[in-house]
Image: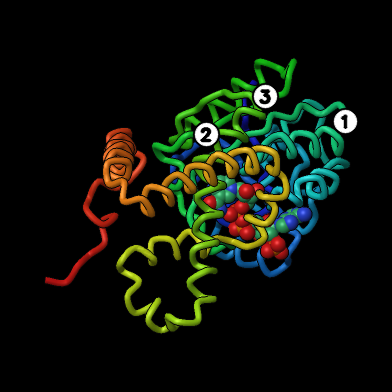
Amino acid sequence: MTIRRLAIIGLGLLGGSIGLAVKARGLAVTTTGWDRDASVRERAAARGLVGTVYDTPEAAVAEADLVILCVPVGAMGDAARAIAAGLKPGAIVSDVGSSKEAVATALAEALPGVTIIPAHPVAGTEQSGPEAGFATLFAGRWCIITPPEGADAQAVQALGDFWTQLGSKVEIMDAAHHDLVLAVTSHIPHLIAYTIVGTASDLEDVTQSEVIKYSAGGFRDFTRIAASDPVMWRDVFLTNKGAVLEMLGRFTEDLTALQRAIRSGDGDTLFDLFTRTRAIRRQVIEQGQDDERPDFGREHGS
Ligand code: NAP
């Protein structure tokens, strides 16, 4: 199974980056695209995110061997229904959604009888829209493929090969397990960032201007994550409810234990945890998942 023609539905950060990566890596794949927003279609065409931007979803997916839905997870069902009439027999439909069980269900309902192989490239930024994409987004990052039970092995292989050609490392995982893992590594960290930034902005005895002025003390690193797209993240929490609530329960217990340690002056507990977490940071860097330069490689004046 060879992918010669790829249709990208949703031409924002993820969709645009896939199109640009195909071009930059010189893959022998013709790219087409569609977005529901006419202004996004215009800007995507101007940036050359895909070879041809079409005005209708059916035209964009006609003849495509692979269609990748790059819309917010809450819009996956609508996007799938929009392309249904244009799909050629045997086409693979995939997506890049950040939660996988709910998306798999939405796609299966919208496209009965179609080969659906959901996936999630674990790569992104806090930017969105057609100007945000870049060709190297997926280089060295994991792409998790979550094939439904009984999925066509050749289709899974073809999708895995495609992501490998974009520079990703590919892992196959069960959708429910994916949702649990990503709840810990991505969804809860975003929730914590949204919370701490929200709490700081609601304080009365510390002014907002003080929060911003002294943000280099740690707060500013949360503000990057908390600047992430509100639609995307609303949908992630609504569609990965079970796993997020389960992990949030664990997190709350651990937070309460820390609260107790601080109140009772239990320095050993604090020191032991902070030592373990430092080791995790070292592993993230060793595995090439972050910039090893101090302070995330920020430039500092002399
Ligand atoms: P984005 O930059 O906002 O792009 C999404 C695009 O899809 C927008 O242009 C949006 O148009 C369009 N769209 C929305 N509903 C649509 C529909 N029914 N049919 C066609 N187009 C539609 O978002 P993104 O960051 O690329 O995220 C896309 C997907 O990637 C999400 O499922 C997200 O969970 C996943 N993901 C994101 C990241 C990340 O860091 N950002 C990382 C990995 C995976 P409007 O602006 O008009 O709504």
Q: Determine which residue is flagged by label 2.
A: 143
> What residue do we see at 57% from left, 23% from top?
172
Q: Is residue 34 left or right of residue 210?
A: right
The foreground one among 135 and 297 is 297
Q: Determine which residue is flagged by label 3.
A: 147
**Label 1, label 3: how far apart the Cα atoms are:** 15 Å
Count of residue discs:
3
Q: Residue 61, position in %: x, y?
A: 75, 43
Q: Quadrant of residue 35?
A: bottom right
> What residue do we see at 67% from left, 24% from top?
147
> Can residue 141 be seen by looking at this rendering?
yes
Q: Element type at marker 2? A: strand
**Which amino acid type corresponds to the residue marked 1 in the rendered image?**
Pro
Q: Residue 213, position in %: x, y?
A: 34, 79
> What residue do we see at 45% from left, 49% from top?
135
Q: Residue 122, position in %: x, y?
A: 51, 40
Q: If the picture is divided into quarters, which one holds ligand 1?
A: bottom right
In the rendered view, how is the structure colored?
A: rainbow
Q: Which tag is nearer the camera, tag 1 or tag 3?
A: 3
First in sequence: mark 1 vs mark 3: 1
Q: Residue 105, position in %: x, y?
A: 79, 34
Q: In this view, does 80 lie to the left or right of 301?
A: right
The circle drawn on residue 112 is 1
